[in-house]
Image (cartoon, rainbow, N blue to C red):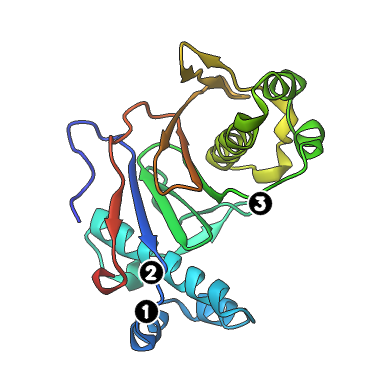
């Protein structure tokens, strides 16, 4: 894996790994041993194998990427959480990361500026969810869509809004209806945060049936996702 773009030190990088059935149990056991004792205890509590696999792959991918960026061994990396639960690197305020998983995909974003990422596997939903959680202008825009396009637009909004609140670092402590997203000339307009920072967005085509959105105060997004395998970790 290459280091962050030195000419654009705030550049965002986006990584993805697919949880496939043919990943060997030996690989998962080896990756599990690379986790900190605290994370080993945490992921061991999962009763569903899929949840265990996603957590192990996600943690291993984040640690691999961060080691590459810092040029240090795993023992030099300590991940802690802020008061809202967002993970960040202790002693490295200028290196940010975020992770998300859904279905068989695990994704992460890394930048020298605040960044958030969200992936969702699309499924049938009750549009009352949008009325309950989205800003009223977003809900009305959703209803104005053709019925066949509403589900896709719903998950566009959901992943974009999730990526924003994760980039801000407050998670669901920042209500989804406290800000509105708007399409302008086919692009999602930036959002100005509470402290005046401008947050920009980019979406990626991951796989049919999935939505992936990234948000950052950085405007230098990659054109493509970097796909990795379990064996590379």
Mark 3 burial class by Cα count in 10 Å: few <14, some 14-19, many 20+ = few
Quarter that holds the N terminus? bottom left
Q: Quadrant of residue 93?
A: top left
Q: Closer to the camera, 213 or 77?
A: 213
Q: Which mark is first along the chain, 2 or 3?
A: 2
User: Which SS class for mark 1?
Assistant: helix
Above or below, 180 against 102 in this view is above
Identify residue for label 2.
60
Q: Quadrant of residue 204?
A: top left
Q: How far, Cα to Cα, is label 1 from label 3? A: 28 Å
Indicate the position of residue 87 as horizontal and vertical percent values. 53, 55
Mark 1 burial class by Cα count in 10 Å: few <14, some 14-19, many 20+ = some
Q: How far, Cα to Cα, is label 3 from label 2? A: 24 Å
Identify residue for label 1.
31
Q: Closer to the camera, 41 or 75?
A: 41
Indicate the position of residue 157 as horizontal and vertical percent values. 60, 32
Identify residue for label 3.
83
Q: Closer to the camera, 83 or 170?
A: 170
In the rendered image, is residue 27 in sight? yes
**Disc 1 or disc 3, which is closer to the eye?**
1
Above or below, 99 against 232 in this view is above
Mark 2 burial class by Cα count in 10 Å: few <14, some 14-19, many 20+ = many
**Disc 3 or disc 2, which is closer to the eye?**
2
Asked whether, in this view, residue 12 is left or right of residue 166, the answer is: left
């Amino acid at each position: 894996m290459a280091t962050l773009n030195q000419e654009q030190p705030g550049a965002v990088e986006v990584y993805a790994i697919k949880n496939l059935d043919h990943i060997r149990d030996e690989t998962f056991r080896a990756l599990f041993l690379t986790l900190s004792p605290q994370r080993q205890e945490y992921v061991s509590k999962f009763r569903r194998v899929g949840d265990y696999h996603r957590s192990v792959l996600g943690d291993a991918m984040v640690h691999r990427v961060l080691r590459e960026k810092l040029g240090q061994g795993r023992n030099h990396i300590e991940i802690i959480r802020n008061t809202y639960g967002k993970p960040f690197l202790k002693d490295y305020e200028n290196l940010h990361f975020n992770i998300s998983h859904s279905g068989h995909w695990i994704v992460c974003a890394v930048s020298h500026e605040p960044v958030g990422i969200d992936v969702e596997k699309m499924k049938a939903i009750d549009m009352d969810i949008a009325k309950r959680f989205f800003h009223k202008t977003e809900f009305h825009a959703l209803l104005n869509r053709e019925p066949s396009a509403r589900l896709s637009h719903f998950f566009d909004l959901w992943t974009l809004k999730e990526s924003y609140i994760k980039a801000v670092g407050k998670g669901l402590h920042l209500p989804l209806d406290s800000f509105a997203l708007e399409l302008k000339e086919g692009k999602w307009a930036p959002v100005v945060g509470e402290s005046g920072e401008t947050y920009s967005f980019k979406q990626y085509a991951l796989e049919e049936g999935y939505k992936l959105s990234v948000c950052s105060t950085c405007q230098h997004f990659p054109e493509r996702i970097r796909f990795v395998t379990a064996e590379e970790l």
